Image: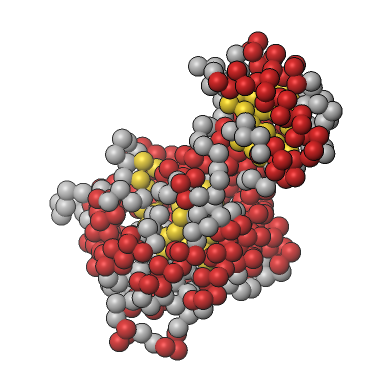
């Protein structure tokens, strides 16, 4: 059914930039728009709304508040019969004008320029106007993604080595309204030894994140986020006692989604007590636990290979294996992470090709009971120490990511190469990312069809298929499904099918492969 929106700056007001932006956003979500221009008489707006059968009328006035209140009161009186038939009315102006006009009680939505673009879009998609209560913001990941489209959710990792400082800055971040998902960065003892205080080392307290030690610590941090745009919260899945931690996360922070690797967070990377095969089994059980509760799972897998200079084909392979196992063990909503700039030196074209290869390999796994959501992020190791250069790198990397239209952008704060970000730097980084995303959406840049990109996509898919076949051969005669068998997957690492240069002297991986960044900017195995 056609939806028509009529909009204008009314009376003597000639300021139409806000009206134009409102109409541009409306067109993105399917409205047919009629722009009447500046300084339009009240009667003309109402007449056009009647003639077009408009379902919504938007008017703007940005001059003197007293004059605006009188003019809009006249407008409300003359348009009252249209409102009674179900036509929606929205008003935009400066904060003083909006404050006066709000007293009239006629307009369903009032915009004073402080609202986020996604809040305006949500209203245009039919959601109630945001009034900064918990009910205004969806409280699950999938609902929030759909609410915010076509903009992606913004996620940022955050955790200071002091609990109170983290709590205070979480409240500041939430109040700013720039971030949709706070990923609590907890310290290593919390990840590994939360239920084992006898194993904790007080000298390591706060190493790598916020030192949460009790369920009430998590509750405090979640409560701090209950303001502003009420961001979702999530955290690490831990490296031991996985199910106990998951139960606590659901109860204390209402975990938005879990991040569960397939091969990592064990003795292979020194971040947990489990051996490789044992941790794979634990992670598969965790997939099943979260899947049974309809909680999305992000397999934060492929980027761990990329950060260790693995060849691009291994990156694609590990992304596929993670998605395959998530589906096999009952995950219903799977978040595929695409870390750009890993290894550093990867070119923009080859980054796009790698992520397109991941998409084309993983997408056939999707179905009614297995939905895919795409998350892009900047490579953690790619940031320069110089803060001005780091800001530029954040913006350009996010711009590139946004051209793939991800559902989530994991913003990595620009100071990361120098220090752990504080609340103000999280807010600044998110604002930089938001503008880069807006620019990308407006520019219509599409690198995906470039011949060199498509050639590389085909090459990566072919190489990945060969690696998958090698894993299948490992399990031939031993198991019905080698790609979901923990012992076969562990053997794929110990035999070198999955390998990376930085895994030299590793207790499980070989670390024998040599890779280089070639002239195209692709990471390949050195001949």
Can you give x and y, in whole percent of width and height, for residue 508 in the image? 32, 71
Q: Nearer the viewer, residue 26 or 488?
A: 26
Can you give x and y, in whole percent of width and height, for residue 342 in the image? 54, 59
Is residue 294 rendered to the left or right of residue 118?
Answer: left
Is residue 314 rendered to the left or right of residue 369?
Answer: right
Q: Is residue 269 visible?
A: no
Q: Residue furthest top?
A: 51
Can you give x and y, in whole percent of width and height, for residue 213 in the image? 38, 78
Is residue 307 rendered to the left or right of residue 214?
Answer: right
How is this picture coloured?
Answer: secondary structure
Look at the picture and state if 502 lies above or below 207.
Answer: above
Look at the picture and state if 379 lies above or below 399.
Answer: below
Q: Identify the residue at image location x=44%, y=59%.
A: 233
Q: Can residue 58 be seen in this view?
A: yes
Q: Identify the residue at image location x=47%, y=43%.
A: 145
Q: Which of 82 and 259 is in front in this view?
A: 82
Q: Which of 339 and 467 is in front in this view?
A: 339
Can you give x and y, in whole percent of width and height, for residue 189 in the image? 39, 79
Look at the picture and state if 288 lies above or below 402.
Answer: below
Q: Identify the residue at image location x=62%, y=21%.
A: 80
Q: Identify the residue at image location x=45%, y=64%.
A: 223
Look at the picture and state if 204 lies above or below 419.
Answer: below
Looking at the rendered structure, the number of numbered marks drawn on it comes to 0
Q: Which of 252 and 29 is in front in this view?
A: 252
Image quadrant in which you'd find residue 516: bottom right
């Amino acid at each position: 059914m056609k939806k028509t929106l009529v909009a204008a700056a009314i009376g003597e007001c000639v300021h139409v930039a806000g009206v134009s932006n409102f109409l541009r956003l409306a067109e993105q979500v399917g409205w047919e728009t009629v722009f009447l221009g500046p300084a339009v008489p009240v009667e003309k707006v109402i007449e056009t709304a009647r003639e077009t059968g408009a379902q919504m009328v938007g008017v703007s006035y940005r001059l003197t508040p007293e004059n605006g209140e009188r003019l809009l009161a006249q407008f409300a009186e003359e348009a009252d019969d249209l409102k009674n038939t179900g036509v929606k009315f929205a008003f935009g102006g400066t904060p003083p004008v909006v404050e006066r006009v709000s007293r009239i009680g006629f307009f369903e939505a009032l915009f004073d320029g402080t609202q986020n673009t996604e809040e305006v879009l949500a209203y245009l998609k039919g959601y109630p106007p945001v009034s900064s209560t918990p009910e205004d913001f969806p409280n699950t990941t999938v609902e929030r993604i759909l609410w915010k489209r076509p903009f992606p959710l913004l996620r940022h990792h955050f955790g200071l080595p002091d609990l109170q400082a983290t709590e205070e800055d979480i409240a500041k971040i939430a109040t700013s309204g720039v971030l949709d998902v706070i990923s609590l960065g907890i310290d290593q003892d919390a990840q590994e030894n939360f239920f084992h205080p006898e194993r904790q080392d007080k000298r390591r307290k706060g190493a790598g994140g916020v030192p949460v030690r009790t369920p009430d610590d998590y509750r405090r941090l979640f409560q701090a986020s209950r303001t502003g745009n009420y961001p979702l919260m999530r955290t690490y899945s831990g490296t031991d006692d996985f199910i106990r931690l998951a139960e606590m996360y659901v109860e204390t922070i209402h975990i938005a989604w879990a991040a569960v690797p397939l091969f990592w967070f064990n003795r292979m990377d020194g971040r947990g007590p489990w051996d490789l095969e044992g941790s794979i089994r634990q992670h598969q059980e965790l997939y099943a636990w979260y899947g049974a509760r309809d909680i999305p799972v992000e397999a934060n897998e492929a980027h761990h290979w990329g950060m260790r200079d693995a060849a691009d084909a291994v990156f694609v392979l590990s992304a596929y294996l993670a998605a395959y196992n998530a589906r096999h063990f009952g995950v219903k909503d799977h978040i595929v992470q695409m870390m750009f700039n890993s290894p550093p030196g990867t070119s923009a074209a080859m980054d796009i090709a790698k992520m397109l290869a991941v998409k084309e390999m993983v997408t056939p796994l999707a179905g009614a009971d297995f939905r895919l959501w795409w998350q892009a992020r900047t490579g953690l190791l790619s940031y320069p120490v110089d803060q001005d250069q780091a800001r530029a790198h954040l913006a350009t990397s996010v711009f590139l990511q946004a051209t793939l239209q991800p559902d989530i952008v994991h913003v990595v704060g620009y100071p990361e190469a120098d220090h752990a970000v504080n609340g103000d730097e999280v807010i600044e980084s998110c604002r930089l990312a938001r503008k880069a995303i807006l620019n990308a959406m407006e520019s219509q840049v599409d690198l995906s069809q470039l011949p060199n990109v498509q050639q590389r996509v085909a090459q990566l898919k072919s190489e990945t298929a060969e690696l998958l076949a090698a894993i299948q051969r490992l399990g031939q005669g031993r198991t019905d499904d080698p790609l979901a068998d923990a012992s076969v997957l562990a053997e794929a690492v110990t035999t070198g099918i999955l390998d990376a240069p930085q895994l030299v002297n590793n207790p499980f991986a070989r670390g024998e492969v040599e890779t280089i960044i070639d002239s195209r900017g692709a990471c390949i195995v050195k001949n």
